Image (spheres, rainbow, N blue to C red):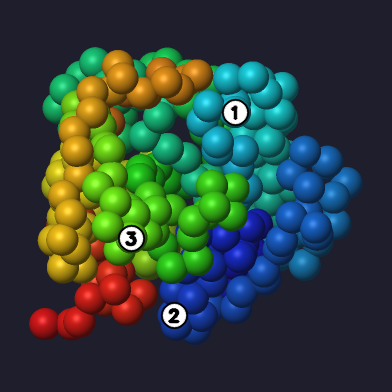
Amino acid sequence: MQIAIIGASGQIGSEVAHAAGAAGVDVLAVNHAACDVTDVTSVERALAPLRAGDAVVNTAAFHRTDACEEAVDQALSVNALGAFNVAVAARSRGATVVYLSTDFVFDGAKRTPYVENDPPSPINVYGASKAAGEALTRAANPASYVVRVSAVFGPAGSSGKGGNFVEAMVAKARAGEAPEVVEDIVMAPTSAIDAAALLVELVRRSAPFGVYHLANAGACSWLEFTSTICTLIGAGVRPRALKASQVNGKARRPLYSVLASDRLSALGLQTRNWSAALAEYLTLKGYRTAL
């Protein structure tokens, strides 16, 4: 079996490559230069080595949430049409496709953890483009997984966002600057390492197709998340609380977007608490000493 990873150098793609390699699965690393998901010919060329029984993980995304509000065409082209192109190319080769999606497909009105069969109801362009990508992926290739993550942190960082939230907060805290963080948005942080391992396991065991949530267990506000970061690295500063209404962003954000991993649990796969995953990440990066 071979897994092609579109975006193999990214925050999640790099961890999928590591997890697949550790599981003895052959990896075909595909970077953006080799595969423009908005171009059918480029996609077909990049995925030509795939055979029946293989899989392709599509992590390509335009995910700068505020920028998506002004670059609607680009968001839809990459996140929706690109997803369709990859799914079609995979199907033509008898391969499974995995589409990375987001908690932003939900509006936050539910106020209890979102499960996999809750209908998408996005309130910003990014979320709408990803919801469209989910639907197009599943329509184009019945052998498909849609895996949702939220507030991702991984060793490689996000090239499109200049790192990740954890790295930004560590830098501020180490500089003695008290970060200003929203206290009324609640989510479930996702370790890229943990999500990648679960993704590879779904593919390896040929789990039932459909939607899965790969966020870590538990929930927290961005303020609590940042406070925990500061505590774990022994910083002498504490974050200052802001309300979401005080942040000047072009895109609306759901105030509650916690993802519950019910379908994973049904398969006997468990996600650990976000705080344990965060502590491991900070230790791995050398920001704290392992206990």
Q: Is residue 31 left or right of residue 175?
A: right
- Distance from the alpha carbon under mark 1 to that under mark 2: 37 Å
Residue in the image at 32% along x and 79% along y: 286
Answer whether labels 3 and 1 touch (C-beta < 8 Å).
no
How far apart are the two marked residues, 3 and 2, measured between alpha carbons? 40 Å
Q: Which mark is residue 259?
A: none
Which corner quadrant of the image does residue 26 belong to?
A: bottom right
Badge nearest the viewer, 3 or 1: 3
**Among numbered discs 3 and 1, the one appearing first in the sequence:** 1
Q: Which mark is residue 175?
A: 3
- Looking at the rendering, in which quadrant would you find the N terminus? bottom right
Question: Observer-nearest residue: 208 or 87?
Answer: 87
- Taking the image as drawn, is residue 122 in sight? no
Q: Which residue is mark 2?
A: 23
Please say if 27 is above or below 153: below
Q: Say which residue label 1 marks.
A: 67
Residue appearing at x 23%, y 28% in the figure: 242
Callout 1 secondary element: helix
Characterize the local packing of mark 2: few (<14), some (14-19) or many (20 or more) Cα atoms within 10 angstroms. few
Mark earlier in primary sequence (1, 2): 2
Kind of residue sitting beneath label 2 = Ala
First in residue order: circle 3 vs circle 2: 2
Residue occupying image coordinates x 85% and y 50%: 42
Q: Amino acid at mark 1?
A: Ala
**Residue under the point 71% across and 29% down:** 74
